[in-house]
Image (spheres, coloured by chain):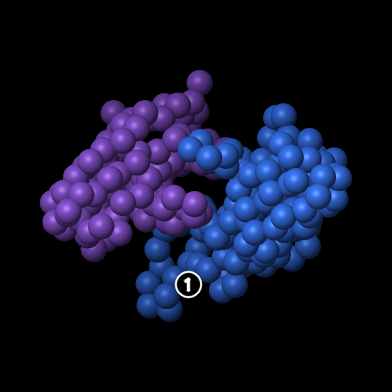
Amino acid sequence: GAVVSQHPSWVICKSGTSVKIECRSLDFQATTMFWYRQFPKQSLMLMATSNEGSKATYEQGVEKDKFLINHASLTLSTLTVTSAHPEDSSFYICSARGLAGDGLRLYGSTDTQYFGPGTRLTVL
Amino acid sequence: GQNIDQPTEMTATEGAIVQINCTYQTSGFNGLFWYQQHAGEAPTFLSYNVLDGLEEKGRFSSFLSRSKGYSYLLLKELQMKDSASYLCAPMDSNYQLIWGAGTKLIIKP
């Protein structure tokens, strides 16, 4: 249980183009998903919190018009990096919050965040 | 403010035991999570503590003292694959996880 997928796993694009990243919770429903960015050897930086059916809440300093988030269902959230520039090159990771189990026991809590494998974005 | 204090790096020997300490200060508290992150990969969930005491899960155990703002992760029978960063992440009153830089654990043969 608690599998979160992310697609694509890596992408290289030209400056000025837009890139869409998908995040799916495969075996549980996630009312809340999170989008993080991580630069090499730095800590995770929360970009935004996404609740199903409502607008995302962006952290201070994150441009909502540049990083578009859509959380259309309980299992899918998307992040679109619009007009990407080289400084947007980073490791983007989503997480889904929910209670997961293996059919016999439940672990974590309803607040446990399970992470996708991440998307490495390189903007040329 | 909110902050987390963990050692930047630790080294241990294969087969041994290592304890990674974490002290934290948060606005409110709703539990503490430990995650493992291998280089170039996303974090994976290890443990969750909300009450004081020890939670054991196989080779990994996590301890919490809320009054002291202190937690530790104990790894037994270390294996080479345990080389990774270990992230202590308390959850604040808004149910947001607070992230630090983590502890890079190096396992030597």
User: For this rendering, which residue is in front, B73 or B36?
Assistant: B36
Depth check: B11 or A23 in front?
Answer: B11
Find residue B62 and report its horizontal and vertical position in percent: 27, 48
Residue A72 picture location, percent across and down: 78, 62
**Residue at the spot 41% in from the left edge and 30% down from the top edge:** B4
The quadrant holding residue B63 is: top left
In percent of width and height, residue A19 lies at 79, 54
Q: Which secondary structure lies at badge 1?
A: loop
Q: Nearer the viewer, residue B51 or B12?
A: B12
Which quadrant of the structure image shows residue A104?
Answer: bottom left
Which residue is found at the position 34% from the left and 41% from the top? B104
| Residue sticking out furthest to the top | B1
Which residue is outermost to the front?
A: A124
Name the image quarter holding residue A86. top right
User: How would you rate the neighbour count of disc 1 (Cα within 10 Å): few for under 14, some for 14-19, many for 20 or more?
Assistant: some
Query: Is residue A24 at least partly visible in the picture?
Result: yes
Looking at numbered disc 1 in the image, what kind of residue is underneath it? Gly
Q: Which chain is blue?
A: A
Rendered residue at 36%/49% (across/down): B84
Picture layout, residue B90 above or below residue A4 = above
Residue at position x 13%, y 51% in the image: B16
In this rendering, would A98 be left or right of B105? right
**Residue B54 % position (x, y):** 23, 49
Q: Is residue A38 left or right of residue B83?
A: right
Name the residue carrying label 1.
Answer: A1
Task: Determine whether, in the image, residue B86 is placed left or right of residue A27.
Answer: left
Chain with purple colouring: B
| Chain at tag 1 | A
Q: Height in image: B7 above or below A110?
A: above
